[in-house]
Image: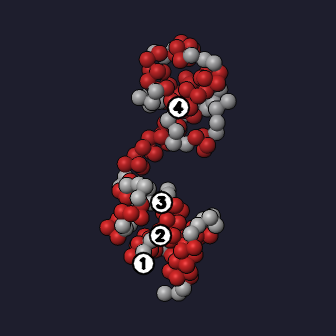
Amino acid sequence: MLPRINKVKGVHPGSLLKRELKKRGIRSSELAAAIDEHKQTISAILNERRGINPKLSIKLGEEFNVAEDYFMILQSAYDVKMEYELIEKPKPNIENFRRALFWDTDLNKIDWDRNSKAVIKRVMERGNENEINEIISYYGKKRLQRAVKSIDKNRLPSFDRNVEEYLMNPA
């Protein structure tokens, strides 16, 4: 049985289809024959080299006993995710961070929103005044205060000192 769309939004439909075929013990050529589609087309979709079109979504929906737009919605969600990843997202002024603070990664490749808790923890534990102020400027005090509450207690003592000094005192 295929998962609900909200559970797999953003996943390429070919990836989901490949998993489902494996679970059911169906070869791609058998699927192609069952829905009257070229096996090269199915192969390209399974290997994420091609997307799903409306006609194919209807055929696959009938074959897998889901709504006819199930695979089309998955394809649209995947396309939106791919476009979104191309958008230049705002980020803090990385000139204000020492390379040594993020020794294990490239500062230009950090997803500042997705990895916000890890970034906040790192800066609050090991950052200097300039770096802490940059993070406060980027995320805002309220967001930092919320994040700090959800960061595990396994942290350096400097974390708590910096939280007290920079986030808890009214400025």
Residue 113: image tag:
3
Residue flagged by tag 4: what amino acid is it? Ser
Disc 1 crowd, CA 10 A, few/some/many (<14, 14-19, 20+): few
Q: CA distance from mark 4 to mark 2?
A: 40 Å
Mark 2, residue position: 126
Asked whether the beta carbons under mark 4 and mark 3 sit within 8 Å of each other, the answer is no
Which one is in front, 121 or 141? 121
Asked whether the beta carbons under mark 2 and mark 1 sit within 8 Å of each other, the answer is no
Q: Nearer the viewer, mark 4 or mark 1?
A: 1
Which one is in front, 45 or 107? 107
Q: Nearer the viewer, mark 4 or mark 2?
A: 2
- Mark earlier in primary sequence (2, 3): 3
Residue flagged by tag 2: what amino acid is it? Arg
Residue flagged by tag 1: what amino acid is it? Glu
Q: Nearer the viewer, mark 2 or mark 1?
A: 2
Residue 141 against residue 104 in the figure, above or below: below
Q: CA distance from mark 2 to mark 3?
A: 19 Å
